[in-house]
Image (tube, rainbow, N blue to C red):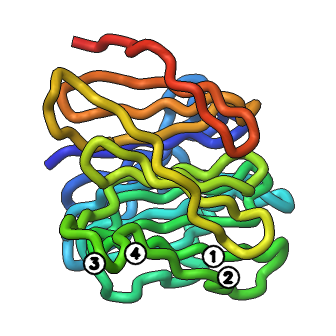
Amino acid sequence: GGAVLAQSPDSSLVARANGKGDVTLWRADDLVKMPGSTFQADPSRSALFAVALTQVGGRTLMAVGGAAVAQLWDVTAEPRLVHDLWDATGAVKGMSFDAAGRTLAVGTTSGVIALWELPVGDDVPRRVHTLTLNKPADPEKAQVWAVALSPSGTSLFVGGRLNAIARWSLAGSPRRLPDLRYEYNNNAVRVQALAVSPEGDQLAAGLQGRRVLRWQLSGEHAIAQPQIGVE
């Protein structure tokens, strides 16, 4: 099966999760494997679809999710499972940390996005909010394909709806904002990957059909930019 990759904020570590439930860790500068670098995140060998890394309180934490698993690991040294985040609502397709490593967003194929508050020490992560991609009157029952938190943790972007990216303001209680709409050759396409720049001023979205769209962000406003073509 395919694989997904993530890099730590300080660019020292790369994590790869594959279609057989395995995770491998490398030093980013020379791609040398870390101690205990390959391990099974999912003993059932189901596919992994999402991985994310953060660094907080001197620790490097990794979130990994897939067809039947959602977990938080401490990979500072020998990999250690910190907490099981799985709630059996659907396969996990998107995971994202904020820059401070205090918030984790987990999106599933059921259209649910769980927001977790992460501890600085060894306390257990706490699920603080549950959001729904699909509105009650929506005829489309979209799956979450990608999620991205802004560096400040005050904005959440979610891909999965046709020709739209869902948005929430997380400053205070979560508040749904108008979707970011886009068109591509008059086709109905979904976002498969999302990323916010380290400065929090740009959003990039990878679409079906190997195209990338970019938005300039300013508070709750976004200005669509020309496509960045990737054939």
Which residue is denoted by mark 1 in the rendering? 116
Q: Looking at the picture, which amino acid does disc 4 mark?
A: Val
Which residue is denoted by mark 2 in the rendering? 125
Q: Which mark is residue 112?
A: 4
Of the two numbered discs 4 and 3 on the same chain, state the one appearing first in sequence.
3
Q: Nearer the viewer, mark 1 or mark 4?
A: 4
Taking 152 as reference, is 171 above or below it?
below
Q: Nearer the viewer, residue 114 or 160?
A: 160
Of the two numbered discs 3 and 1 on the same chain, state the one appearing first in sequence.
3
Query: What SS does tag 4 mark?
Result: strand
Q: Looking at the rendering, in which quadrant would you find the C terminus?
A: top left
Which residue is denoted by mark 3 in the rendering? 90
Image coords of residue 151 (percent x, y): 73, 45
Image coords of residue 168 (percent x, y): 59, 60
Of the two numbered discs 3 and 2 on the same chain, state the one appearing first in sequence.
3
Q: Is the Cβ of the residue at disc 3 closer than 8 Å to that at disc 2?
A: no
Q: Nearer the viewer, mark 2 or mark 4?
A: 4
